[in-house]
Amino acid sequence: MSAAVDTLPDMLARLKLTAMRDRLDGLLDEAARGDLSLRETLALLCRAEVSHREERRIQMATSIAKFPHQRTLEGFDYSAQPSLDPRQVRDLATCRWVANGDALLIQGPPGVGKSHLAIALGREAVRHGYSVLFTPATALVTMLVQGHAEGKLEQRLAQLAKPKLLIVDEFGYLPFEPAAAHLLFQLVSRRYERGSILITSNRAVGDWGTVLGDEVVATAILDRLMHHSHVLTIRGDSYRLREKRRSGLLKATPAPASAGAS
Ligand code: ADP
Ligand code: MG
């Protein structure tokens, strides 16, 4: 079909402006109702296309990131974690640290919202246009160990070096096998000053040698991670237990004997 006889929807489809094509009548009605000028009408049409593409990009990047749950910063209750400074989290939500390739360590006991914040900050990074990959620490190590055994370590390292932000969740919940420390060191070196790593852990940095089973390699890994880094430390109660206590399923923790009666 020649361009001369193409209808407007046909031409929009050929130009791959599908949101404009699909919403053409509604948008033109809206422009007429609002008495928009030609330029304003064109802007209205373009805005529809641009926001549709942005939505699709975010959907695609979110599915590539493999977040295990949907968690948002809006859904985080700061009043439950007074040890956390909301300003620090808001600052991290700007994703400047991701742009700079910095590391972020979120540490604290189980149930205090480490994974929640990791996912929520990962989502912010996606919104800001960065590629993200979320992986539990054990799965990451398995992937590296298997890659190594199959002679595909290089391929795995390249794959894991690609996303601008790599989120490693639950570092330290399980001890790693002996080969893991060196493989993790290779990964951290590969990503060093190129991409960001976000690690959540229930273990203090001083325990990483024990977790990795190798003090020297743990120090070398920390040296690279901590060079440009941010740390969020959450102290306090598990959110789940707190909710249960509130609903009466669990008894409140008894106050220490030295505490006043008030
Ligand atoms: P952690 O990773 O520190 O063990 P999670 O992030 O998995 O803890 O939190 C456990 C559950 O409690 C999750 O469903 C999480 O969304 C929720 N949660 C934890 N802290 C908060 C909070 N401050 N506000 C809202 N939900 C929270
Ligand atoms: Mg967790």
Image (cartoon, rainbow, N blue to C red):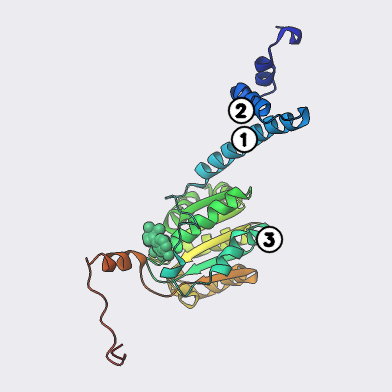
Q: Is residue 242 left or right of residue 70?
A: left
User: Within the image, what quadrant is residue 185 found in?
Assistant: bottom right
Q: Position of residue 124 (x, y in %)?
A: 57, 53
Task: Name the residue carrying label 3.
Answer: 100
**Is tag 1's residue or tag 3's residue first in the polypeptide sequence?**
1
Q: Which mark is residue 166?
A: none
Location of the C terminus by quadrant is: bottom left
In contact (CB < 8 Å): disc 2 and disc 1: yes
**Is tag 2's residue or tag 3's residue first in the polypeptide sequence?**
2
Is 69 rendered above or below residue 172?
Answer: above
Q: Is residue 125 left or right of residue 5?
A: left
**Is tag 2's residue or tag 1's residue first in the polypeptide sequence?**
2
Q: Residues within 10 Å of mark 2 (few under 14, many from 20)?
A: some
Q: Position of residue 149 (x, y in %)?
A: 47, 51
Q: Residue at 45% of width from left, 57% of height from top?
A: 75
In contact (CB < 8 Å): disc 1 and disc 3: no
Distance between the Cα atoms at labels 2 and 1?
A: 8 Å
Q: Position of residue 126 (x, y in %)?
A: 58, 49
Task: Name the residue carrying label 1.
Answer: 53
Q: Amino acid at mark 1?
A: Arg
